[in-house]
Image (cartoon, grey):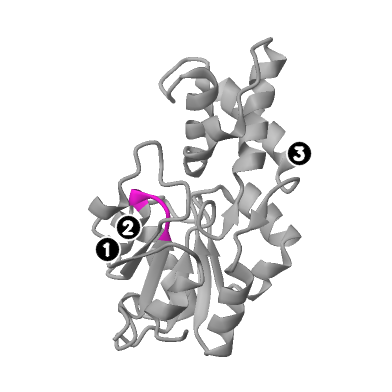
Amino acid sequence: MSAFASAGIRAVLFDLDGTLIDSAPDLGSAADQLRVHRGLPSLPLDAYRSMAGAGARGMLAVAFGITPEHPDFPALREEFFTNYERCIHDRTYAFEGVPELVEALGRNTLQWGIVTNKATRFTSLIAQRMALFGTAGAVVSGDTTPHSKPHPAPLLEAAARLGVAPQHCIYVGDDERDIVAGRAAGMGTVAAMYGYLGAHGAPQGWGADAMVESPLEVLKLLGLD
């Protein structure tokens, strides 16, 4: 029997970047513009991709090798945010299979939602420009609750908005913090192996209940393939 077929799952929650959408090209471009503006050579997208799930922190670490503790970080972060707002949907797209996955969930009367650490100012822009997200029953951003992932609060907020008990939800994400948050919230957890996975991604050690190599494999876990 498939991993969650007998678990009474009523809702599927997803991380956004690296799980539903590939936003790495636009995130990397926004960071690389900072380098070029300062006379530094451009870096290839592959240099940024694995850290795209970490947002400004990840992009600035790649572009300049700095952490949030560096005195220049706040100003660079704001400049990065400005660049990103300008190009937020230039080359961002849903991963192959995501539209079909979302459609199949609806067809099988399963609710779905998004839980991301991305700030609302960016999440709302993407949701407005990608019709795919029009059927999401809940969209919880990094600043929706007082805590962001790996804290379980955003996941519990999404479940509450959907009116579904946490134990009847699964959470799909491409970063260890997603799995940590999902487990803490009492949800089934799925590691998206096709995502960014972080600089030293080792999903086999995250403790996820299942792993998928493509979005449509989530349907198999639910016994819907």
Answer with left or right where residue 72 lies relative to residue 69: right
Dot 2 lies on which element? helix
On the image, the x and y values in percent for residue 131 come to 73, 67
Q: Is residue 166 magenta?
A: no
On the image, the x and y values in percent for residue 90 come to 76, 45
Name the amino acid, label 2.
Ile
Q: Residue at x 46, y 69 (%)?
A: 13
Dot 1 lies on which element? helix
- Asked where in the image residue 178 lies, by quadrant, the reply is bottom left
Question: What is the quadrant of the N terminus in the image?
Answer: bottom left
Name the amino acid, label 1.
Arg
Mark 1 and mark 2: Cα distance apart in space: 6 Å
Q: Which stretch did the figure color magenta?
A: 173-177
To which residue does mark 2 refer?
179
Q: Is residue 175 magenta?
A: yes
Answer with left or right where residue 7 lies relative to residue 48: left
Q: Residue at x 50, y 84 (%)?
A: 110
To which residue does mark 3 refer?
86
Q: Closest to the observer: 149 or 39?
A: 39
Q: Residue at x 49, y 74 (%)?
A: 161
Q: Is residue 220 above or below residue 51?
A: below
Q: Is residue 155 above or below residue 86?
A: below
User: Circles 1 and 2: CB distance less than 8 Å?
Assistant: yes
User: Sequence-wise, which precedes: disc 1 or disc 3?
Assistant: 3
On the image, the x and y values in percent for residue 66 come to 46, 20
Q: Closest to the observer: 62 or 143?
A: 62
Name the amino acid, label 3.
Arg
To which residue does mark 1 refer?
183
Graded by Cα atoms within 10 Å as few (under 14), some (14 to 19) or many (20 or more), the crowding at tag 2 reads many
Graded by Cα atoms within 10 Å as few (under 14), some (14 to 19) or many (20 or more), the crowding at tag 3 reads few
